[in-house]
Amino acid sequence: MFVQRPVFLGSLVLGFFFFFFVNGQKCSKSSSLIGYESEFRMLQHQLRGVFTVLDDCSFRVSRFDMLSGSDVHWWGAMTSDFDNMTDSGFVISDQKLNQTFNNQSFVVRLLDNVTWDKIGVVSVWDLPTASDFGHVLLPNATEKDSSSSKSGSPPSESKDAAPGKSNNSEPLKAPTMFDNCKKLSDKYRLRWSLNVDEGYVDIGLEATTGLLNYMAFGWAKPNSTSNLMLNADVVITGIREDGFPFADDFYITKSSVCSVRDGIAAGVCPDTVYEGSDAVGSSVNNTKLVYGHRIDGVSFVRYRRPLNDSDNKFDFPVNATENLTVIWALGVIKPPDVINPYYLPENHGGVESENYGHFSLSLSENVDECLGPLDADNKYDQGVIIADANAPLVVTAGPSVHYPNPPNPSKVLYINKKEAPVLRVERGVPVKFSIEAGHDVSFYITSDFLGGNASLRNRTETIYAGGQETHGVLSSPLELVWAPNRNTPDQLYYHSIFQEKMGWKVQVVDGGLSDMYNNSVNLDDQQVKFFWTIVGDSISIAARGEKKSGYLAIGFGSEMTNSYAYVGWFDRNGTGHVNTYWIDGESASSIQPTVENMTYVRCKSEEGIITLEFTRPLKPSCSHRDRPECKNMIDPTTPLKVIWAMGAKWTDGQLTERNMHSVTSQRPVRVMLTRGSAEAEQDLRPVLGVHGFMMFLAWGILLPGGILSARYLKHIKGDGWFKIHMYLQCSGLAIVFLGLLFAVAELNGFSFSSSHVKFGFTAIVLACAQPVNAWLRPAKPAQGELMSSKRLIWEYSHSIVGQSAVVIGVVALFTGMKHLGERNGAENVDGLNWALGLWVFLGVVTVVYLEYRERGRRRARNLSRGNWVLGNVEEDDSTDLIDSRGGFRDKDDEEGRNGGRSEIQLEPLK
């Protein structure tokens, strides 16, 4: 007992503490709102529930349904209009509502600084989107901008839903709330509230069905046991194209679409059609539309029908306490046309219990089978506009009637006459807007959900198109073109930059890869297609397999060994990944993971066909240059060698031989990134081989030979050196042009981006300048005259340009070898490089030798001029290319060579 005593004392102390703590937390009940009860008005996220004020600091929520949001709180404001809710609203409780609620009940405590006199509206509010999911109005508030006050809004609730109920009267009714609910199928529900005293029943039909689909419910003919649809009294409901609801009384005489022949109606027809043109609609149509909407992809219509007020022809009396057979169906509806003014249901088709059915129902029984809200797969099918590249989207402004994200301003944006629709665009397909919304509305595409210039709310946004100057009117519209690309986010928004929440969402979907990328080629064996776009210093790449596989890999290199690989694959959860590797061997252990700076990474599979996409910089920015990925640079001016492989399974863990490819490319494909073309890898294309040989013949033999003949063959009698010079130069120049034509024809043109083309073109230009230079040479000086400065300049320029052309031409030969190595692999041109280098070396040695001989001949000639012997019949016709004055001498100077003074020595004849 002594051991248990401390435990007992501790529990007693804790109990006293809890008692006083709870009593200290109790709230007073001084507010006049104590006991006030109201049903939530649904605006979004299928919100339903009952609100009750408990005391001065708390309220109860019961029967609460709601689809989850992102950051949802209890919100308070004085009135429910847009400006007050967004600008003056505030969080009133620390409870968050970020989950889906299924018919739940709980108590909410207000924050310590919040009292009921500060609140006129209690709302369920999503902070990031400034969205009102639903709210209740307290008696001290009035709804300034309710939907019932809007021109052309759907019919509001009946008289028992009038606002302004006191705390002692009936709770404020919402048209979406009912006493009973029965689940007809996974996507269709029946709700009803019976009022026996007033003699009517309110029926609510809701379904996750298409926009132009109907919801049908009604009573089968009494005592019918088969073909229950025949002679049934049903109501056809739905949502029209403009977003307004309808509910019409129908009678079924046969299972077909209503038709009238010879004045007799047959099929599923409105009651008024059977009565003819003289019928008064209200006399045979006892259905009254109460309310309807389409929210979050769910159609909801509430209507009222009397229990016993029947026309004895097409409407049956309903005994609320008796089990009666009822029928229901979902299907496609045929809109009105010139001949038919009604919405007519077509055959429902489908499977029983999913698209149609029947059961026994007693309206007086309490039924609650609907647990939680309906959740549609497609929540934004209402008002979707798909952009077409060939038709502009007309942007105007108009009154708010069915804005999808309340609260909202009174004026919103319309696109193609639809109020704030969801705009769906494709990547790579330009979208053209015609802005006619007025000069007070500046249209723009933004990343900010609310629009209206996010900087004013201390937030950042990315503007993708439009801005402050993007405004126009009907008489002078402004054209705006926006081209979303593969890097454009999936979700954007269109708004006015001057006003929040005037527009709505932009869904950016993938178009064809050929639309999203500027270039594409087929890789080896036509089993993988390669796409790319170069923007600035980055490149966006995509690859798509042409057959099913477990993974798809592309690599940059001549073969898998020593290549950089990008692998697209899927894990067990079906999530796509793109991994990068450096492969330095043929085994699985040689595949080394790398970390590359990739953005906009995607990997998707359609029926087993894998597509991978990513964007990466052309030149990686690495702090550690020893990492393999730092050397993975892409030069747009150089052909990129691309290979591919496919296999059954991949993993980001330990790779084994089972992860190796089952099919691969046989050879790499050289992708010309700047030209948008590709060619298969091969040793040496014959035409390019002829081009190289002809250029070597011209720049390596003929043109240098022509220069050497002009310098070292002047000692030959007559003008032989001149003829050799002319023949060699003309032949070399002709061969250069032929080689150039071969290369241009084979490559479909050429780009100045490579060093080979730059050097080659420069050499050709200099070589072509030589014949023009020779044609324009100044006249030779007369005998005894000094050479003019023009002649001297010409001789220097002719020599320097010719020698420079040959030197640059030889450099072009070496850069051509380098270019050939980049295209075909260094091992194919190493021998040619060595041979060319040896040839140039031999040429240099030959020039040195000839120059040595020429200088020796020049010294001997100078000595012989001082000892000329009469009777020596040998004439010295040799001359230096450049004489002692620094000028050139040609054939024209031969005649005046002996015009100066000379010493004559006479010798006796022997």
Image (tube, grey):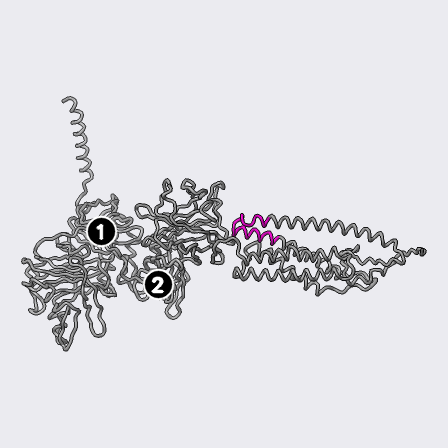
Of all residues, the one furthest to the top in this rendering is: 2
- Residue 736: percent from left, percent from top: 62, 60
Q: Position of residue 249 (x, y in %)?
A: 14, 67
Q: Residue at image x 32%, y 58%? A: 504
Residue annotated with mark 2: 387
Q: Which mark is residue 170?
A: none
* Three-letter code for the amino acid on which mark 2 is drawn: Ala
**Cα gap from disc 1 to disc 2, whole angstroms:** 32 Å
Quarter the C terminus occupies: bottom right
> Left or right: where does residue 175 sit relative to residue 610?
left
Viewer can see residue 11: yes
Between 711 and 632, the one lying in front of the other is 711
**Side of 248 relative to 617 (left or right):** left
Q: Are marks 1 and 2 in contact (CB under 8 Å)?
A: no
Q: Identify the residue at horizontal 9%, vertical 59% (top origin).
A: 195
Image: magenta residue range: 811-833
Q: Secondary structure at mark 2?
A: loop
Specify the quadrant of the image occupied by residue 246: bottom left
**Would residue 506 be found to the left or right of residue 232 on screen?**
right
Quadrant in the picture for residue 705: bottom right
- Residue nearest the viewer, comparing 665 with 501: 665
Q: Which residue is mark 1?
A: 66
Count of labels shown? 2
**Mark closest to the chain's N terminus, 1 or 2:** 1
Name the amino acid type tagged 1. Met
Give percent across and percent down for residue 207: 20, 58
Mark 1 lies on a secondary structure that is strand
